[in-house]
């Protein structure tokens, strides 16, 4: 069976690591990222916010969710570009 979600390559994590590490404690960054997800996929945004309420580390839960979503999104974009641009 073919994977429905992209298989995230290690390069993706390395690619976004700097941005994420710089912003992991920044409430504005977290709110902006949640807003982007809200526009793109409101169910995911709702789940992230609802789930985070069940943890003692709300910000940590949101941040981890943002990282996973961002890695999947970037890998999907890379895969799409690779299939569109034959190099």
Image: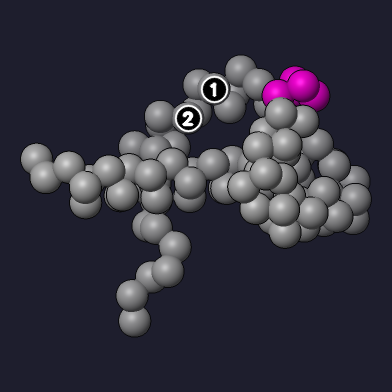
Q: Tell me the element at label 2.
A: helix
Residue for badge 1:
19
Label 1 crowd (10 A; few <14 / some 14-19 / many >=20): few
Predominant secondary structure in magenta?
Answer: helix
Residue positioned 76% across, 45% down in the render: 61
Residue segment shown in magenta: 25-29
The image shows residue 17, relative to residue 74, as above or below, that is above
Q: Is residue 72 left or right of residue 27?
A: left
Task: Locate the N terminus and report the quarter of the image it occupies.
Answer: bottom left
Front-most of residues 29 and 58: 29
> Which residue is rendered at x = 44% and y = 37% of the image?
13
Q: Position of residue 59 (x, y in %)?
A: 81, 36
Name the residue at 27% across, 43% down.
Answer: 81
Mark 1: which secondary structure? helix
Q: Residue 26: where, in percent of width, then height? A: 75, 20
Query: Which residue carries the number 2 mark?
Result: 16
């Amino acid at each position: 069976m073919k994977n429905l979600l992209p298989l995230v390559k290690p390069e993706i994590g390395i690619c976004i690591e700097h941005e994420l590490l710089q912003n992991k404690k920044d409430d504005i960054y977290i709110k902006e990222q949640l807003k982007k997800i809200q526009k793109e996929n409101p169910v995911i945004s709702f789940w992230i916010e609802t789930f985070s309420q069940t943890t003692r580390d709300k910000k940590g839960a949101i941040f981890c969710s943002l990282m996973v979503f961002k890695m999947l999104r970037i890998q999907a974009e890379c895969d799409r570009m690779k299939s569109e641009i034959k190099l």
